[in-house]
Amino acid sequence: MPQIPLRPTQLIVNLSQLRRNLNAIRARVRPAKVLVMLKANAYGHGLEGVAAFIEPDVDYIGVAVLNEAIALRQMGIRKPILVAGGCLPEQIPYYLEHDLTLTVSSPEILSAAETVSQAGGRALKIHIKIDTGMERAGIRWYEAAPLLEQSLHCQRVEVEGIYTHFANSETPETPHLKRKRGYAAPSTQLERFAETLDFYVRRSLPTPPLRHAANSGAILNLPESFFEMVRPGILFYGIYPGEQSARTVNVSPAATWVSRVFYAKTTRAGHPVSYGSLWHGEQPLETVTIPCGYADGYFRRLTNRASVLVNGKKYPQVGRICMDQFMVNLMGDSAQLGDDVILLGRAASGEQISAEDLAGWAGTNAYEVMTNISARVPRVFVED
Ligand SMILES: *Cc1c(COP(=O)(O)O)cnc(C)c1O
């Protein structure tokens, strides 16, 4: 069967760069283990390609939802997988069947896990999630002791880990921030986590289970939070979690979002471009059409705000972004059908558009930009 040529709109993922990013993180956190977060289609980079490549280099894999974990097992991934999100009791048998690590945040789920383990005749691995200030999921630190006590009495469940998650780790903490009412300071969250872990000392248990807390922000800003394992997400993909994050780990983006000119024409002065007639030129100029739109994750709210690189030079996007296409003003220059376009990434010319640029234009963060690049955009994996 002849292969259908891929769309010219592609996300090119440099796997070697992902490995370099992981090595840089490892060097910072050593001897802590590294759980790499592959949730949300590996932050949009493409779960299958990223997982198969990086599996040998990671200690643990993290995802948010059960389906992601099962997809990884179905691809043949054998490393331990932590499902960090919540869970309904009826989902627990799937954790046992696929050898997945369950996050436990309540006595109900712990009891259900014990029952499933007993019925299945196998130990289900669990990590207990302590909420130290996020108020999302997790047993609150001030009411965790009974759950920890219950976990000591489980016969079949294997309590492998205990963890928490930071609300504000991407911004370095200042005394001013720490005093701010209603602010969950990373240091405060760490103190609360330590308070919870004191349970194991009081019970004279030799070692608590595997402790972990640090997301990308904490890896950069908070060495006290490394414990036995860290959980990088965005940093592994080469993106810093916030503008103010310390650059204590040197990473670079692994993804380049490319396309090509699909149509080039001269647009007359005063002739509006695209739906809603939101833009027109004051003199005739060349505009090009790019085969990428909001259904690919190029947000509609980027309309008249974004820039793209055409043949390595930066030009403004103009007119309403459509579902499948958008237009670019070549500012008096011209281009040919098939010319190179970069929506995100660095051109050979040195010009670049970062995930932070797109995020700024769209009024969001780099996480949302990356995780919204849709399934319609082919992922192309390269190594250097
Ligand atoms: C997503 C996630 C992470 C990774 O967060 P980053 O900010 O991308 O590093 C770590 N831990 C948990 C529980 C998560 O849900």
Image (cartoon, rainbow, N blue to C red):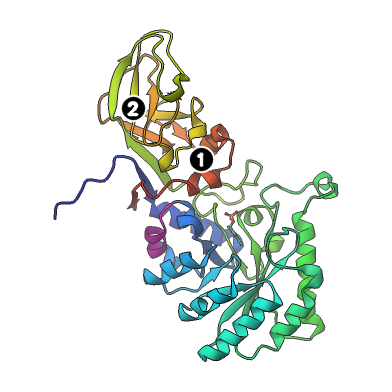
Indicate left or right for 170 with 344 as reference: right
SS of the residue under disc 2: strand
In this rendering, is residue 8 above or below 69?
above
Residue found at x 33% / y 24%: 288
* Count of labels in the image: 2
Q: Marks 2 and 1, Cα distance to the nearest angstrom? A: 22 Å
Is the residue marked by circle 2 packed among few (<14), some (14-19), or many (20+) residues within 10 Å? some
Indicate left or right for 246 with 317 as reference: right
Amino acid type, mark 2: Thr
SS of the residue under disc 1: helix
What segment is highlighted magenta in the picture? 45-53
Residue 365 percent coordinates (x, y): 58, 42
Q: What residue is pinned by disc 1?
A: 355
Which is in the foreground here, disc 2 or disc 1? 2
Q: Is residue 142 magenta?
A: no
Which of the two residues, 70 or 79, is positioned nearer the viewer here? Answer: 70
Residue found at x 22% / y 45%: 5
**Residue 124, numbered label:** none
